[in-house]
Amino acid sequence: QGQQEVSFSDVSAGDWFYGEVAKATAAGYLTGYKDNTVRPKQWITREEVAVLLCRLSKLNTDGSNAPASSFLDAADISSWANPGIATAVQYRLMNGYPDGTFRPQDFATRAEALVALDKVFWYINPVLITPM
């Protein structure tokens, strides 16, 4: 099985992350920016994480934006990310903060990323645990 070519201008075949970018692109959850980059060495924002999680989980983001609009900082959410944030919150892949904000432009912490990925893992591969 051959590996899909990566056509982003900021990803080269010799990059340590090339294979993962190729897989993510082929799977459809990594699409890149309008300038044909993925900016792999930049930090990722919480709104970008929300959108990636929904794509990875294959969740329909065409529904209501209501959960995203309920945050006190809803005006800070990029229009392209609003459906993803709403869906990520609806499916409890991500949450807002106790002060009622989502902080979409903040960078995701390692802890936030780990918790979100764990939730996606369990959403994609639910495991029924039964007593022995």
Image (spheres, grey):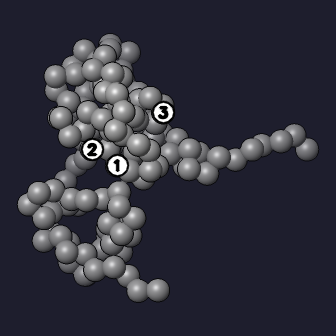
52 or 18: nearer the viewer? 52
Residue designated by label 2: 48
Label 2, label 1: how far apart the Cα atoms are = 6 Å
Q: Earlier in the sequence, mark 3 or mark 1?
A: 1
Q: Are marks 2 and 1 in contact (CB under 8 Å)?
A: yes
Instruction: Give 87 or 71, whichever is nearer the viewer.
Output: 87
Q: Which SS class for mark 1?
A: helix
- Please, what is the three-letter code of the amino acid marked with disc 2? Glu
Q: Quadrant of the C terminus?
A: top right
Question: Which residue is found at the position 20% from the left and 30% from the top?
Answer: 77
Residue 127, numbered label: none
Q: Are marks 3 and 2 in contact (CB under 8 Å)?
A: no
- Left or right, 8 with respect to 102, comes to left
- In which quarter of the view is residue 20 placed? bottom left
Question: Which amino acid is tagged 1?
Answer: Leu
Q: Secondary structure at mark 3?
A: loop
Label 2's element?
Answer: helix
Residue under label 3: 91
The residue identified by callout 1 is 52
**Horizontal and vertical percent for residue 14?**
25, 81
Q: Residue furthest bottom?
A: 2
Taking 42 as reference, is 36 above or below it? below
